[in-house]
Amino acid sequence: MTDSRDEPLVLGIETSCDETGVGIVRGTTLLADAIASSVDEHARFGGVVPEVASRAHLEAMVPTIDRALKEAGVSARDLDGIAVTAGPGLAGALLVGVSAAKAYAYALGKPLYGVNHLASHICVDQLEHGALPEPTMALLVSGGHSSLLLSSDITSDVRPMGATIDDAAGEAFDKIARVLNLGFPGGPVIDRYAREGDPAAIAFPRGLTGPRDPAYDFSFSGLKTAVARWIEAKRAAGEEVPVRDVSASFQEAVVDVLTRKAVRACKDEGVDHLMIGGGVAANSRLRALAQERCEAAGIRLRVPRPKLCTDNGAMVAALGAEMVARNRPASSWDLSADSSLPVTDPHVPGHDHSHDHVHEVSKENLYS
Ligand code: KG4
Ligand code: ZN
């Protein structure tokens, strides 16, 4: 494709958790990234409340789509497809996005692409650094997931290498922030305090790093308990809790394990590109340590800017555009939300309707 106008123009909808994201991309170029977040509505509960998230998506959906179209300066009629997160995520929240995507796609006569949230987190990097090398190792770390994935073709071949066996990395940040009374979400606050603390002040445990432990799986629940006990002991002794040192030492334990295992997976598989995505990829120490360790191992590191790392619609549009560019079949109209959609399904074609032409849907068909 020489003329960028030939590249697919795709709108993507993301509602798997608490952000209503609508992005528009042309090929690998970002045109709009509109977000409405319900994070403030969850803050007083210390975590995302699914029913609150679903209702917020419903209210934000149409205005956010309008905002994205305006920001991109395109008309909905010009779209080549509509992509939507089909899973994994919160069932009710996903359902709002999938229903909206179907309604827009059907009404506009555009193909629908149900895509995988984790594969989208990887694909978004194309908007920052251009086409993803194949293969690419991906470390995805957020409040809901922590996994190592090997992507050989982001539209069809994503292999899980390892995942957390208990808490997600972001969840550990959020829980420790709660113990320290720092509010929700905890990652950004701990990141800030940690910059003024000593990462070697307290030796917190590194989960699943023993010689017999699975090489690519993670565990953060032991670390979380160790940090909470340490803080409780200080409080019980009437001593002040050194928030900066605790933050730095806890954060170091998390990012040490994440980067060590990611680099090891690259070396073992002979992969020389590592991408890091998900909300925790915004962490400044994770970025710095990953850079240091990748350089030492001859691995090229790709980390999108923080706004593209957290949940957003642009990542869904990016993967949708890749589906169109590679002629992947569109999803069928009976596409459903799947809260535990496996990453081995980067997209959900449904039944083979690849010969259907949605453009031919006529009023007669609609009302018969
Ligand atoms: O990807 P995301 O927006 O939503 C999920 O899919 O979970 O990630 C949110 C998570 C939260 O747990 C938040 O505490 C964490 O990412 N996070 C961070 C940072 N910024 C956000 N964790 C560590 N350091 C940060 N700077
Ligand atoms: Zn996510």
Image: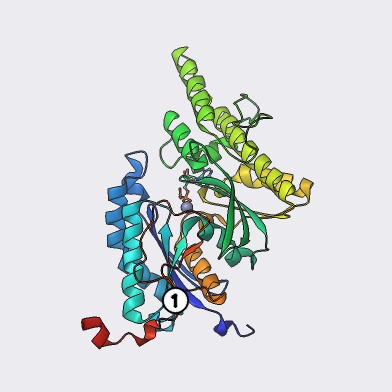
Residue at position x 41%, y 69% in the image: 351
Badge 1 crowding class, 10 Å Cα cut-off, few under 14, some 14 to 19, many 20 or more, is: many
**Amino acid type, mark 1:** Gly
> Residue 55 versus residue 93: which sits nearer the camera?
93
Residue at position x 70%, y 49% in the image: 266
Task: Please indicate, yes or no, whether residue 30 appears anywhere in the rendered image.
Answer: no
Residue 275: horizontal and vertical position, in percent? 63, 54
Residue at position x 54%, y 29% in the image: 223
Residue 290: horizontal and vertical position, in percent? 67, 46
Residue 120: horizontal and vertical position, in percent? 51, 60
Position of 343 with respect to 99 (left or right) is right
Q: Can you name the residue that lies furthest to the front here?
A: 352
User: Image quadrant for the N terminus?
Assistant: bottom right
> How is the rendered protein coloured?
rainbow
> Residue 78 versus residue 219: which sits nearer the camera?
219
Disc 1 secondary structure class: strand
Residue 21: horizontal and vertical position, in percent? 41, 62
> Residue 189 versus residue 209: which sits nearer the camera?
209
Considering only vertical position in the picture, is 96 above or below 258? below
Q: In terms of image quadrants, where is residue 304?
A: bottom right
Task: Please indicate, yes or no, whether residue 264 appears anywhere in the rendered image.
Answer: yes
Residue that numbered label 1 is attached to:
81
> Residue 293 versus residue 189: which sits nearer the camera?
293
Residue at position x 21%, y 83% in the image: 368
Considering only vertical position in the picture, is 361 above or below 220? below
